Amino acid sequence: MPAEPPSGPLLEVRNLRTGFRTRRGLLQAVDGVAFAIARAETVAIVGESGSGKSVTAMSILRLFGRTDRAAIEGAILLHGRDGGIRDLVTLPEPELRDVRGREIAVIFQDPSASLNPVFPIGEQIAEAIRRHRPQEAAHAARAAVELLRDVGIADPERRVAAYPHQLSGGMRQRVMIAIALACQPRLLIADEPTTALDVTIQAQIMRLLADLKAARGMGLLFITHDLALVGEIADRVVVMYAGQVVETGATDAVLAAPRHPYTRALLECRPERHYRDGAEDERLLRPIAGQPPRPTEVAAGCRFAPRCPLAEAACRAGPVDLHLLHGDRQSRCRRWDAMA
Amino acid sequence: MTALIEVAGLAKHFPLPRRGFGPRGAVRAVDGVSFRVAPGEVLGLVGESGSGKSTVGRLALRLLDPTAGRVRFDGQDITTASLRALRPLRRSMQMVFQDPYASLNPRRSVGEAIGEVLRLHGIGTRSERRDRAGALLAKVGLSAADLGRMPREFSGGQRQRIAIARALAVEPRFLVADEPVSALDVSVQAGILALLRGLQAELSLAMLFISHDLSVVEVMADRVMVLYLGRVMEVGPTRTMFTAPRHPYTAGLLAAAPRLDRGAAPAVVLRDEIPSPADPPSGCVFRTRCPFALADCAATVPEPRTVGPDHQMACIRDDVTF
Ligand SMILES: Nc1ncnc2c1ncn2[C@@H]1O[C@H](COP(=O)(O)OP(=O)(O)OP(=O)(O)O)[C@@H](O)[C@H]1O
Ligand SMILES: Nc1ncnc2c1ncn2[C@@H]1O[C@H](COP(=O)(O)OP(=O)(O)OP(=O)(O)O)[C@@H](O)[C@H]1O
Ligand code: SF4
Ligand code: SF4
Ligand SMILES: [Mg+2]
Ligand SMILES: [Mg+2]
């Protein structure tokens, strides 16, 4: 395997538009999303339910079924180890299948849905190894044990024989990670991998992902609705709202001083309590008023305007573009400088 | 303060299906749990999945019969009361569940759902019930105009508001809220929590607030109780529990919660997973994951002991601090 250059682009998503042809017309779930992931970098996508995070992730590998009637436009450029560039939007299916196996792997929130209930887990990992690394087929069973060890499963020699239902949710997610790693991906996409887990197990999986990423020099696209997790793992963050990117930049900078009212609202809606001596404690409960627009009824102007405390008439007049603030910091808010 | 709810030595063991000829095992879901909730007080209940939180909530309302122990409501023992004697008390004790989709009948309008609860308790005439349902909807941030609408027409957060309105319709004095915001988006959680907290204070409700989300429990609770494998590890005032926990498990839970302002490395890192409650460790049930365990921890079950004002914990060590 050629050595990976230590830096440079890995994946570039440009003006991604993914829609679904439904009976009631085209549902534009993702509408002009752009971001890039450098080699060995972790990028997080964060946003409310329905903002288009999963559709973005699924678009990268075209994981939709025929009945989804998905239409993907734009460009998704994968930079190869050898420097070659392929556009995953137009790549023929057989070649894309190769990418799915060898370059990019995905793990989802619900590992049960992806594991086969009738095969022992070791067999499922070995199968992934045989499929993606045929040259190692002879040692697949042993490699499966090693992968289980890598993902922190104790007593892996015995555990390879276990069936998915014999494992806890956290263990099943570890097995999914092991299967994803079997192809030695250059990019791992993790779509809310810890949402169904206890905080203690979540913390373990987060540590595991960070360690594996560092050890293998993988890129990581981490999808979550929890900004605190973003802060723990990501180098850069992409905030999505109603199918669009509304803010992006270095994680620390965005969390410390958001430049889009939606990002700030997401930070502030986390419950907080400030203890006071000799007085009533301050309990901060600040929901984001209203709801995101349905994909079928987005307004012409800023999509966040109906919920935005800074909105003014001009915000509703026409589309608001992403403003480049400095470096790679961007905000889709006309009034970003009023937020300092 | 006199307690509205007083629970002593509560246990619930679910029998396991018999295997072979051996003795029949049991899941020790709850084991020796005692606590009190005063009128107008919120007791938060936290612990990992399977620690017994929901079982405690259901036992406290006697939706389940305990294997051992007692629950007193307003001085009356409800563990031995007949179902008939319980009926007038039922009205005083209500529950809100995690899943706002499952807890509302999809074929009943919102007005019917609330009216039904009132009718069951023999409250008001038909038109009085309707007025009352409208007023309740207004209280939870919806409106009387929503009475005729069906549950599917509402978002998850709105459905949870309806479930809260229904629980409060009969003017309970004690409410068990079991993960009431866990199924909701973060952006709407705060609204539901503010609503619950406001109503709780206004109506002077006693509340058992169950959640696996520590930041949610921190804002809601006056006191916090930590469960592990069906046993109470620590209980104390919210501020004490979050700023100066004494039990290693509490410290581990706090360290695991993701937070934006993470500073130094966590004091306690919890490894592995909660063992099966069908076969809990001897002595201190937490010892298999405890970084501070000593040989003695396997021998005896630590008794809860008082370590500060209103603050108890069940650990034999007092030489560790976090
Ligand atoms: N196969 C599909 N057919 C039609 N609409 C879809 C399909 N998949 C997703 N959508 C719609 O696209 C929008 C974005 O969905 P997506 O799953 O990307 O949201 P998300 O940000 O991942 O939310 P969550 O946090 O709930 O996972 C939603 O309105 C959703 O209903
Ligand atoms: N009806 C039942 N029959 C058998 N076992 C049960 C029953 N109800 C609960 N249990 C078991 O009792 C233990 C405690 O369950 P409980 O639902 O109270 O936990 P919990 O703390 O509420 O967990 P979660 O966070 O997942 O809701 C678990 O091991 C569970 O499997
Ligand atoms: S453009 Fe206007 S409405 Fe949109 S986020 Fe900025 S201030 Fe709010
Ligand atoms: S009693 Fe022992 S095992 Fe249990 S929490 Fe204390 S030190 Fe840890
Ligand atoms: Mg999703
Ligand atoms: Mg529960």
Image (spheres, coloured by chain):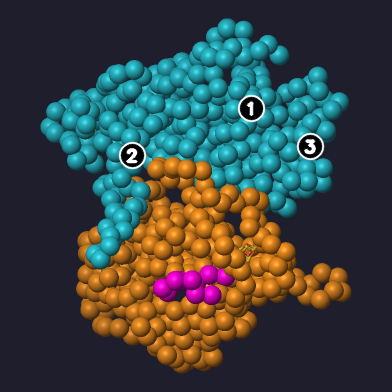
Residue identifier under label 2: A294
* Residue A132 pos. (x, y %): 73, 23
- Tell me if B123 is positioned left or right of A105 in this view: left
Q: Say if mark 3 contacts mark 2, CB within 8 Å.
A: no
Callout 3: helix, strand or loop?
A: helix
What amino acid is labelled 2 in the image? Arg
Magenta stretch? B305-314
Residue identifier under label 1: A215
Residue identifier under label 3: A145
User: Few, some or many C-alpha atoms within 10 Å of disc 2 (few <14, some 14-19, many ≥20)?
Assistant: some
Closest to the observer, A314 or B295 = B295
* Mark closest to the chain's N terminus, 2 or 1: 1
Q: Is residue A194 above or below residue A141?
A: below
Q: CA distance from mark 1 to mark 3?
A: 18 Å
* Mark closest to the chain's N terminus, 1 or 3: 3
For residue A52: magenta? Answer: no
- Give the drawing colour for chain B: orange
